[in-house]
Amino acid sequence: MAEEEDLSANLLSEGMKHTKGDFVAPDGICWISVLSCLLLACSYVGSLYVWRSDLPRDHPAVIKRRFTSVLIVSALSPLFVWAWRECTGVRTGSSLLALMGIRFEGLIPAIILPLLLTMVLFLGPLIQLAMDCPWSFIDGIRVAFDPWFWMLCLSDMRWLRNQVVAPLTEELVFRACMLPMLVPCAGPFTAIFTCPLFFGVAHFHHVIELLRFRQGTLSGIFLSAVFQFSYTAVFGAYTAFIFIRTGHLIGPVLCHSFCNYMGFPAISTALEHPHRLTVLSSYLLGVFLFFLFLFPFTDPSFYGLPTPVCTLTSSLSSLCLS
């Protein structure tokens, strides 16, 4: 009995907190986690500015250079999680890749359900787009299966950035790498709202370019930055929620790509639409159905219960349960 008491005293003096399973979270982990996330965010944004150029961000030459640097940082980002795990001594039964949402279990539902849920949220804009589109439904299907259409898209640097590279690298860095470092410190619920702060702040670098090329007034640029921070923070919380509930990276990536394609809903245009009642009703219906299906479509039982990132907590949060 005396030996057990001495062992407990030693563990307490070392600042260790034992939890269920083989997970151990040391005191001071929050500082290490936050600093690691901050360093990772700075590395990602900083990689965009290693190239000196007087050209705007949408110029193909600038996009190609930034592809190179941001893909290198993204490829190295798992090393941040590995170094964090080695530094903190956190251990779980899941592999590093599984913690980052790269796994096969539940892959098919992870591809379909989160994207479908996001499309439900955008029901209003989709209905509005369908009404205003000059193509028929059959024409749209033909274009979607036309290889020349996709070859044209892949040759467009801005399309590649917005639909492929940005969603993949941002979700890898700001969700797959940061959430495993934040969850042991803050828990799943708080991590969902903490992680997007890094994501939102990381988008403030657009202000530098707007000021540099004098694209608007100072007050207009500031308001644009505040709006973009708010929008990206809310979106980041949503994809963080999907990542924690599904334990997969692919879902947030596809949702990110879809939202980049759709853009922010054109509510002002909807208010002036000839079929305003139908369009606005579809907006409201989409929001209602989104909240109705939010938890059923992200039920962890579809993706393997519990999801790997949820094993980094002392007790399973309700977010991690079906």
Image: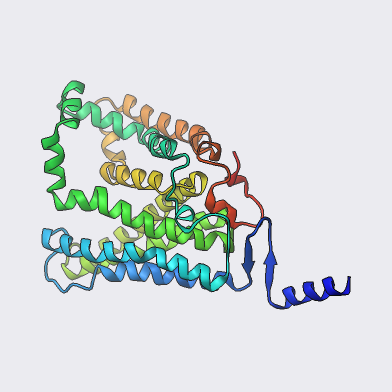
Q: Tell me if residue 142 comes above or below residue 93 in the rendering.
A: above
**Residue found at x 89% / y 70%:** 1
Question: Can residue 219 be seen from the camera position used here?
Answer: no
Find residue 134 and report its image quarter. top left
Question: Can residue 163 be seen from the camera position used here?
Answer: yes
Q: Position of residue 318 (x, y in %)?
A: 62, 45
Could you tell me how many numbered marks the image carries?
A: 0
**Residue found at x 19% / y 27%:** 140
Q: Tell me if residue 217 comes above or below residue 97 in the rendering.
A: below
**Residue found at x 49% / y 55%:** 99
Q: Which quadrant holds the C terminus? A: top right
Find residue 150 and report its image quarter. top left
Q: Position of residue 125 (x, y in %)?
A: 30, 34
Q: Is residue 22 left or right of residue 256?
A: right
* In-front residue for pair 133/88: 88
* The residue positioned farthest toward the right in the image shown: 1
Q: Is residue 32 left or right of residue 11?
A: left
**Residue found at x 24% / y 32%:** 129
Q: Is residue 4 left or right of residue 168?
A: right
Q: Tell me if residue 111 comes above or below residue 7 in the rendering.
A: above
* In-front residue for pair 103/149: 103
Q: Position of residue 245 (x, y in %)?
A: 52, 45
What sort of colour scheme is used for the picture?
Answer: rainbow
Q: Position of residue 76 (x, y in %)?
A: 35, 66
